[in-house]
Image (cartoon, rainbow, N blue to C red):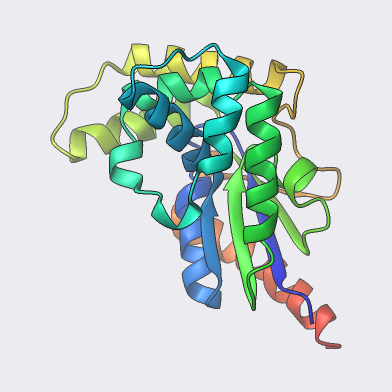
Amino acid sequence: MNPFVIAIDGPAASGKGTMARRIAQAYGFVHLDTGLTYRAVAKALLAEGLPLDDEALAGEYAEKVDLAALDRETLSTHTVGEAASKVAVMPAVRRALVEKQREFAQTPPGAVLDGRDIGTVVCPEAQVKLYVTASAEIRAARRTDEIVANGGTADSAAILEDIRRRDERDMGRTDSPLMPAIDAHLLDTSEMDIEAAFQAAKAYIDEALAKRNGG
């Protein structure tokens, strides 16, 4: 039987990553935050002082990305994130990384991938597709709270502006724009905590698993 694939998409700070990690743990599936793959390309270019606007070069570095060596902590800095947003729009980079992501999705017994084009481009045949979202204001407030909880200082107005800018960039790009797949289950977490959102997602997954197993 083919691996069971769960595709989770959504805008920045929607909680899709937390959701994906929890689902993977609950079902014993492997998990990939595809955003880290783009950050890995950006970090490699930054580390060697290379330009971020050379698509052929960025594509070469994308082909070298090792999914088993992605380190969330070092890849989650603001500098790397800003650089990643520049290379992530390049078709050559996207082609190389999508191929790696598709290979990862074939890991038995199942895989959970989260990003912005999983259900539409990377894994259009995924057994379950979720689109996790929340209002920009709620997402900015959550990001602000997270930064403060980790001992940092945050400018909530600047964070809100950054989220709106990222939404516009992600949804407006020509190659693989952020949008829910036609058959995705929409989870608006504006009024939900993580537990309620997880239980809603779990219901969709359990139903799909039961159908697959002939239940």
Q: Kindly identify the residue that appears in the image at 48 percent across and 50 percent down.
A: 66
Horizontally, residue 89 falls left or right of residue 74, namely right
- Which x, y percent locates residue 61? 52, 33
Q: Residue 195 in the image: x percent, y percent?
A: 46, 61
* 127 versus 169 height, above or below: below
Image location (x, y in percent) of residue 122: 73, 46
192 and 148: which is toward the camera: 148
Which residue appears at 73% of the width and 26% of the height? 177
Q: Is residue 192 visible?
A: no
Identify the image quadrant of residue 57: top right
Which of the image's four quarters has the C terminus?
bottom right
Image point 54% across, 56% down: which residue? 197
Which quadrant is the N terminus positioned in? bottom right
On screen, residue 121 above or below 110: above
Question: In the image, 102: left or right of 125?
Answer: left
Give the quadrant of residue 156. Answer: top left
> Which of the two residues, 90 or 197, is positioned nearer the viewer here?
90
- Asked whether, in this view, residue 72 is left or right of residue 109, the answer is left
Q: Residue at x 60, y 54 (%)?
A: 113
Instruction: Report the number of numbered marks.
Output: 0
x and y, in percent, of residue 53 in the image: 54, 11
